[in-house]
């Protein structure tokens, strides 16, 4: 009798562990709302973006249409990207602490790959997946970047 109870307990434990592991997938949802946009950025016209650690803030595409929720921070990470040889990365410029369109993170002049929220003063490391230091605990929202020759393409 005791073995049957033990066997049922093992199966129950295994089921609970499996359920927990399966729920730990890509279910992360940013506090920044998802918006549709399309950005093409020509690196031959703006070559500084090809420098590792250098980021630019982009608020509108070539048609004058807003990109991202509060603009984008686009650049070439110092770290190797999980996207393969493409180490360009793009973040929404909206601060996850504030999560408002009108609160846009600014690049810190003289500090490669660093940006700060003007309201809560959280500093984000753009070379480290948007890692927050300060009040904020949520990483910046990331968008995939594809490369076609000298053109960077960011879409959502």
Image (cartoon, rainbow, N blue to C red):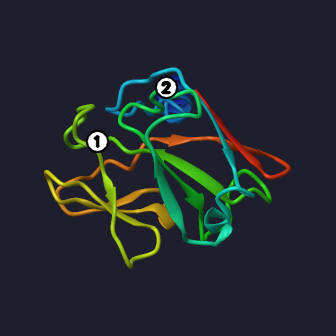
Residue at 22% of width from left, 35% of height from top? Answer: 102
Estimate the x, y position of residue 69 in percent, counting from the top left. 38, 31
| Residue 25 in picture, x, y percent from top left | 55, 34
Task: Tell me the residue at 23%/32% (across/down).
Answer: 100
Mark nearest the camera among 1 and 2 is 2
Residues 21 and 70: in front is 70
> Can you give x and y, in whole percent of width and height, for residue 109 in the image?
35, 72
Query: SS class of the residue under badge 2?
Result: loop
* Label 1 secondary element: loop
Q: Is residue 128 left or right of residue 63?
A: left
Identify the residue under disc 2. Answer: 65
**CA distance for labels 1 and 2:** 22 Å
Q: Quadrant of residue 88?
A: bottom right
Q: Which of 153 and 59 is in front in this view?
A: 59
Residue 12 in the image: above or below residue 24:
above
Few, some or many C-alpha atoms within 10 Å of disc 1 (few <14, some 14-19, many ≥20)?
A: many
14 sits left or right of 96 in the view: right
* Residue identified by numbered label 1: 96
Residue 36 shows which numbered tag? none
Res. 43 image quadrant: bottom right
As drawn, 57 above or below 12: below
């Amino acid at each position: 009798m005791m073995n049957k109870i033990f066997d049922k307990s093992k199966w129950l434990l295994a089921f609970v562990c499996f359920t927990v592991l399966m729920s730990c997938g890509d279910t992360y949802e940013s506090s920044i709302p998802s918006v549709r946009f399309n950005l093409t950025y020509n690196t031959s016209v703006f070559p500084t973006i090809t420098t590792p650690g250098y980021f630019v803030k982009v608020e509108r595409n070539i048609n004058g249409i807003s990109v991202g929720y509060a603009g984008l921070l686009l650049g070439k990470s110092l770290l190797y990207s999980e996207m393969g040889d493409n180490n360009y990365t793009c973040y929404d410029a909206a601060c996850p602490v504030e999560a408002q369109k009108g609160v846009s993170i600014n690049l810190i002049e003289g500090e490669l790959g660093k940006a700060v929220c003007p309201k809560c003063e959280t500093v984000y490391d753009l070379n480290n997946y948007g890692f927050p230091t300060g009040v904020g605990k949520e990483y910046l929202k990331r968008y995939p970047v594809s490369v076609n020759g000298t053109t960077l393409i960011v879409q959502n």
